[in-house]
Amino acid sequence: MKTIVSRLGKTIELRVPQFGDEEQLAKFINGLVDEEAPILINQQQTRQEEKIYLGEAIERVDKKLRVQYLSFYEEKLVANCQVDKGRFREERVGTFGISVVKEHRGDGIGFQLARQVIDEARKKLGIYLVQLNVYAGNEKALGLYRKLGFIEYGRLPRAIAYKQRFVDRVHMYLALE
Ligand SMILES: CC(C)(COP(=O)(O)OP(=O)(O)OC[C@H]1O[C@@H](n2cnc3c(N)ncnc32)[C@H](O)[C@@H]1OP(=O)(O)O)[C@@H](O)C(=O)NCCC(=O)NCCS
């Protein structure tokens, strides 16, 4: 079992997704939806929908098309992070995503988890670039990504409808050695 220790000294356990995680995953994503977190999904997900997400996640990890770690504190899911391998001519580009539950943010979990996932993606997926997108104004995520070494390379203007406004979608990349 992989672990990380947060700034406050909490031991966080990392493991790959497993059948049976759908209940925790539904609570996790629906908590983010409830707080209107700056992520793509803005509608409550059912347990059945999470079961489908989970099945796909397990299959992709098994086929070495994804590196993903769920993070648990005292058996509660507190963070989710993944890199997905691209397809066909883009097979050397990975796409990154991360979320941490509100109560555990700012404790260094996101940074350590992201480093672990990106490092493993580099070794297992044969990728040389990681890309992501983030909403303009999401300063916490932008700060995390800059700290990880990501560089902004473009913006899709006013692409995202978020809290009664339209905000840019910021595109970033990280070149791996
Ligand atoms: C973005 C997110 C994943 C960061 O995770 P986290 O565990 O809180 O981040 P960490 O505590 O590891 O902090 C890492 C860096 O992020 C930045 N950061 C974190 N919290 C911040 C805040 N409140 N304000 C500004 N920057 C912040 C800082 O650069 C920080 O480094 P530092 O502590 O050395 O200053 C988390 O805030 C989150 O899940 N937010 C909601 C969902 C989301 O936005 N997901 C990303 C979608 S693109």
Image (cartoon, helix red, strand yellow):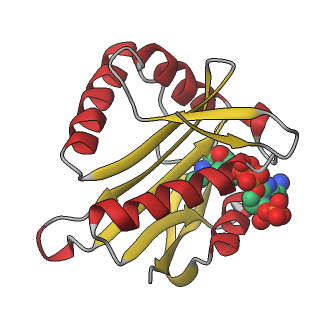
Q: Is residue 143 above or below residue 73?
A: below
Q: Is residue 84 left or right of residue 89?
A: right
Q: Position of residue 65 (x, y in %)?
A: 24, 53
Judged from this view, the residue extending furthest toward the left is 88
Q: Residue at x 32, y 19 (%)?
A: 19
Q: Quadrant of residue 17?
A: top left
Rendering coords of residue 113 (x, y %) = 60, 50
Q: Kindly tell me whether residue 19 is visible in this rendering.
A: yes
Asked whether the viewer can see residue 163, the reply is no
Is 139 above or below relative to 128?
Answer: above
Instruction: Name the residue at 46% across, 14% down.
Output: 23
Quarter containing the C terminus: bottom left
* Residue 142 position by quadrant: bottom right
Residue 174: image location, x then y, percent: 49, 78
Whole-percent x and y of residue 137? 70, 64
Question: Which residue is rendered at x = 37% and y = 14% of the image?
Answer: 20
Above or below, 85 relative to 40: below
The reply, left or right, for residue 139 in relation to residue 69 is right
The residue positioned farthest toward the front in the image shown:
1
User: Residue 129 or 12: which is nearer the viewer?
Assistant: 12
In the rendered view, does 155 fall on the left or right side of 61? Answer: right
Residue at 31 percent of width and 60 percent of height? 124
The number of discs equals 0
Kindly indicate the quadrant of the structure image that contains residue 176.
bottom left
> Which of the four quarters of the rendered structure image does ligand 1 lie in?
bottom right
